[in-house]
Image: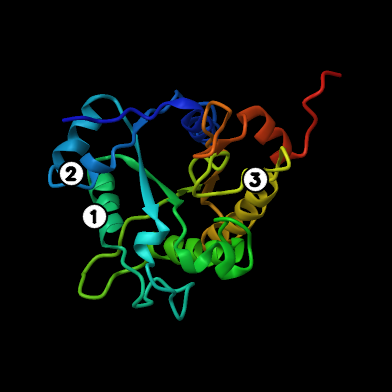
Amino acid sequence: MRLAAVIGSAVTLALSVVSIATAGGPLRTGFLDPTAFGGPNAAISVVRAQKAGATMTRIVLFWSAAAAAAPANPESPNDPAYNWSAVDSQVVDAVGGGLEPIIDIAGSPKWARGPAVGLPGTWPSPAMLAQFAHAAALRYSGTFTPAGQAEPLPRVRYWEAWNEPNAGSDLSPQRVNGRPVSPGHYRKMVNAFAGAVHAVASGNYVIAGTLGPFEHDSKDIQVVAPMRFMADLLCVSMQAP
């Protein structure tokens, strides 16, 4: 069974946030493998991850898959346009197997990005992202019971806003006239996302800045250097004092 270890600058930030949240406890490790945790061998995958010493798993909630069509009531997890089944099973398996889930929301649907909402390229609407995050956080608040089920879904405390926001093509353009523009828009996304997730439960944790590790610029993909991206995102100077 292949389990892709959670590594890289993206997870370095994620795990450091978790370490801080646990008040200086030991470093926690986890896995990311949608094929294993979302496939027919999900149960045994969770067991093997736990035996390997993992305490967490990162679950990708693809907005575009969960909401192929625009919902009429986007902040409600009950809207019939939403399809949560793939993530429901992964959250239940993870918690049942003793792993803490991190839900990473990524991949905007066409109706929520770019020209469809008056934005350039493929940038998603921060307001629409917040609405979807709110619905997801309600569904996995520990108090939501889906129709036809007897028990509420497990609580998810850790919420990640996107994956590698410093890289196209899902978020583009990254630069305009050579200047990074992605950090400014991602800041709006994170602020909207955090407000929505915390409105559901103030004890939820928001993970941001999970970045691609190398700068790159080609006709196929643009990647802003991680340090440049974070400096612009946090509005700090990269110049030495």
Residue drawn at (66%, 54%) of the image: 188
- Amino acid type, label 3: Ser
Residue drawn at (55%, 69%) of the image: 116
Residue 61 horizontal/vertical position (percent): 38, 53
Q: From the image, state whether disc 3 or disc 2 is nearer to you.
A: 3
Q: Given contact means CB atoms under 8 Å apart, are the residues at marks 3 and 2 in contact?
A: no
| C-alpha gap between disc 3 and disc 1 | 33 Å
Question: Which quarter of the picture shows residue 202?
Answer: bottom right
* Between discs 3 and 2, the one toward the N terminus: 2
Quadrant into which the N terminus falls: top left
Find the residue positioned furthest to the top. 240
Residue drawn at (31%, 63%) of the image: 84
Residue 53 horizontal/vertical position (percent): 29, 25
Disc 1 marks which residue?
89
* Between discs 2 and 1, the one toward the N terminus: 2
| C-alpha gap between disc 2 and disc 1 | 9 Å
Q: Given contact means CB atoms under 8 Å apart, are the residues at marks 3 and 1 in contact?
A: no
In screen coordinates, is 237 left or right of 81? right
Q: Is residue 222 above or below residue 120?
A: above
In screen coordinates, is 160 left or right of 69? right
Disc 2 marks which residue?
42
Disc 3 marks which residue?
182
Quadrant into which the C terminus falls: top right
- Amino acid type, label 1: Ser
Residue 154 horizontal/vertical position (percent): 32, 56
Residue drawn at (18%, 44%) of the image: 42
